[in-house]
Amino acid sequence: MRIRALRVNHMENPIGYRMERTVFSWKVDEAKGTRQDAAQILVYADRACRELIYDSTLRPELDSIGTELPIPLRPRTRYFWRVIVESDAGERAESELAFFETGKRDEPWQATWIGCQSADSRHPLFQKTISLTGELAAARLYICGLGLYEAYLNDRKIGDEYLTPHYNDYDRWLQTDTYDVTAQLNDRATLSVLLGNGWYKGRFSFFENDTAGKYGQDFRLIAELHLDYTDGRHEVIGTDESWDVGASHITFSGIYDGEHRDDTLPPLSLGKACRLPAPPAPLTDRMSVPVRAYREWKPTALIHTPAGETVLDLGQNFSGIFRLQVNEARGQTTRLQFGELLQGGNFYRDNLRTAKAEYVYISGGEPVELTPHFTFYGYRYVKLEGISDLQPEDFTAVGLSSCESQIGSVETGHALVNRLIENARWGLLSNSLDVPTDCPQRDERLGWTGDAQVFSSTALSLYDLHAFYAKYLYDMAREQEAQDGCVPNYIPSQGASACSAAWGDAACIIPWNLYETYGDPSILADSYDSMKVWVEYIRRVDAENHGWSRAEHFGDWLALDHESGDANENSGATDKGFIAQVYYMQSAEILSKSASVLGKADDAANYGALAARLRDHIQFEYFSGSGRCCVNTQTAYLLALRHGLSVDEDYIRQRLRELFFFKSDKLLTGFVGTPLALPTLSEHGMGGLAAKLLLNEDYPGWLYAVKLGATTIWERWDSLLADGSISGTGMNSLNHYAYGSVVEWIIRYAGGLRQAVGSVGYRRVLVAPELNWQLRWMRTEFDSPVGRYVISWELTTPRHVTLRVSVPFGGEALVRLPDSADKTEKQLGAGEYEFSYETVRPLKPELSASSPISALYENEKIKAMILARLPELQVLKKSMWDHPLDQLLLAVAGFVGLPDREIMAQEVIPYLAREIRRLDTE
Ligand code: BGC
């Protein structure tokens, strides 16, 4: 038996994070037993475990997915801990030692904020010489530099993070980072801190004319170096007027516009630092998880374009920076521009709107390695100018992301679907740079709540992101304090205050998704006020006359069914008021459930009653007494089924089926409908249609983009037209993950790994894959809070399936064998299981008169037979070929010389059916 994955607040050995509570978790594997009988947590003051400061004693109720440490913590202190587990088979294991270290917490700062005189645009470098006065035991740097900072000891960067001190509402709180610099400090060392613009200052705003920076105009720095000597002395070197300031060679930086470096500039001292008044926002231990370089790679091609440009192709759209070796004559300007696509074979970047996304370098005449410090790009292609002898190996792509540990994966036997899954994963990596963003390339890159809301379930199925979202939710709550509970459309809001249904409801949906995934109720406790004030905010706007329905909302954003038929009408056809009321109800329901989890019985009852009243209102306003829905769109029917809104669900199912059928089984849905579509269809017995929507290779559909070479998820169903040309530049990113939320369905329904109803933390999963001949096989893995589940299935023949299920220690699986004669539900504890059986139906579709015409026409003999019997079908448009032959024939009977309905039904279709079966089995 082995204990692994020791975490504190869902982070591995965290240093310097804000800790309002201390939640331990761990996982067990390689055990003979199936579950934990009891556990014991031991916390020590030292690595040698001589000073025990907490002993939980061996107890059955210590939960491996979240146990809170009930002792107060001191600032700047490292705690060591281990856990002992006993299993139900009598095994006993002791974990390795893990640690966590507190930051400054409430300890006052001895250092002061410093700034400097301006050196025009040259970014400042603050420096201090450090002389050690004894043998060092430990050294820590506590620091915050605005806009962004990079710290160095003797020119070596401290830590491996980028874009520090992260992105949050700097008017409300400032994040302090902690670095263990013990190993990097020498007897005499220079501590340097370079400052740049970033999110805090410089141009970064949704509003084009806002160029000044929302939060501040000045570079500012505060830092404390804490030195512990072996003789017990403690020394603090803080920022003050003794620090020297020099002007660096960086002359410009900006999130949207890139960075400039001029090596011809002479060294320039700016004298001593000056003291600045403390900014109004408090310094707080960090919550942001690190942005790190997760991968480096070389270009896949060097392209000389028809327009005469030199372009490197990285083979993959992503967000990050680069490294480039150059050796140019003094004064030579080198310029790099970043873009997502080529058009007509040429470099293209008009869809970045006003973002310059470039890097400009003026050579000092020496060979150097260039890399930006205070910006990032969303790109696949780089155009390079002013380089005399470019070799592709001189360029290295550096992918940056806050996503670190991948804990879930899914693979199928279908190459295009696998690429789609990869595209969604790249979309997640690219849009998780400290905040969950809409896109990483154009003049936006904001923490849009709606995008985060719809993608969060997929994100949580792929990466370990509890701490990442916890910080986003903390930001959200701070914004709400200033905005009367309203959840602004993007977080941080930069002061903007508009909100929308399905976007703002992220305040309830994301914490609930986190709770369901991790099973740790502390996220609900931490988010509870934010959820509640959001619901109360809506309640005030809604007032007596359902004013929330009439407020400004995005609706089913980017859906294709707007009544005008105009693709630039972004809100789709689904009544925005209907969407607003449904999400209001959903948020009230989540709030009520959260209140129950937290033992707040009154709130649970009150918000439960509110949700019930909203349900009544929605049914009264949007449904007839017999269950007809008056909003006649795919998205509305999906919402109706998802939330059980109609009294006649059979009717809603049938009508939804028709709404797809008459659109050749294509989705017209946007940001609201798309994430719900496939799971809802599967939940309502229409898994076949769900699979068909996924596997559709034409516009609009996921594989349409894959077939056009997409390496990430596009913002629009038609970001590129079929000939590869871009459909517009106003709002058209090729790296927007919202529609990538289909991966949730791929994992949970096709792959068959989803939580059982009522389970949290994956203690109990339901294994019920929807087998599909085109996918042929799937393998789904998830290293859940209790441990790793692996579900795989394979169709060795159209009638034979092998299903393998691996259940971790502490987990449980309910297995429903798909397409099996055996309908019993198997209840499995930890272990490995295999089921191999003949299916009750063939999974490769046998052709019949009910097959889609396209499938029938793939068999030339059948096609010839059908057209010989019904030559009128020669003129049938290809767009109709998705329909089942018999249904189509009944619909068109009597037209254009075709036999009438009765003859069609009684003679023609039976004849065709017989001939199809005969020719299919020939
Ligand atoms: C963003 C979206 C966002 C939307 C709001 C766009 O500009 O890129 O993804 O959700 O605005 O409707």
Image: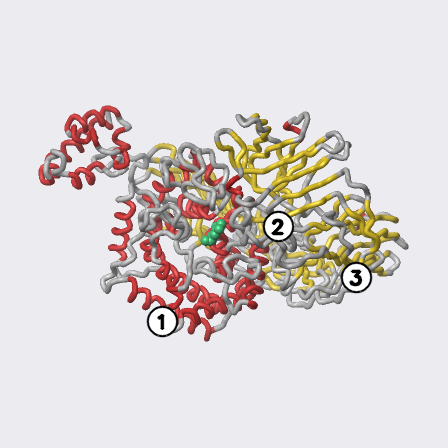
Is tag 1's residue or tag 2's residue first in the polypeptide sequence? 2
Asked whether, in this view, residue 326 is left or right of residue 604, the answer is: right
Residue type at mark 3 is Arg
Compared with residue 20, is residue 707 higher up or lower down, i.e. above or below?
above
Give the labeled residue for mark 1. Answer: 545
Question: Looking at the rendering, which quadrant does residue 361 occupy?
Answer: top right
**Spatial distance from mark 1 to mark 3, Cα to Cα?**
55 Å
Whether residue 93 appears in this view of the structure is: no
Give the labeled residue for mark 2. Answer: 4
Asked whether, in this view, residue 260 is left or right of residue 537, the answer is: right
Question: Looking at the rendering, which quadrant does residue 218 occupy?
Answer: bottom right
Compared with residue 811, is residue 590 higher up or lower down, i.e. above or below?
below
Residue type at mark 1 is Asn
Give the labeled residue for mark 3. Answer: 275
Circle 3 sits in a helix, a strand or a loop, which is it?
strand
Residue type at mark 2 is Arg
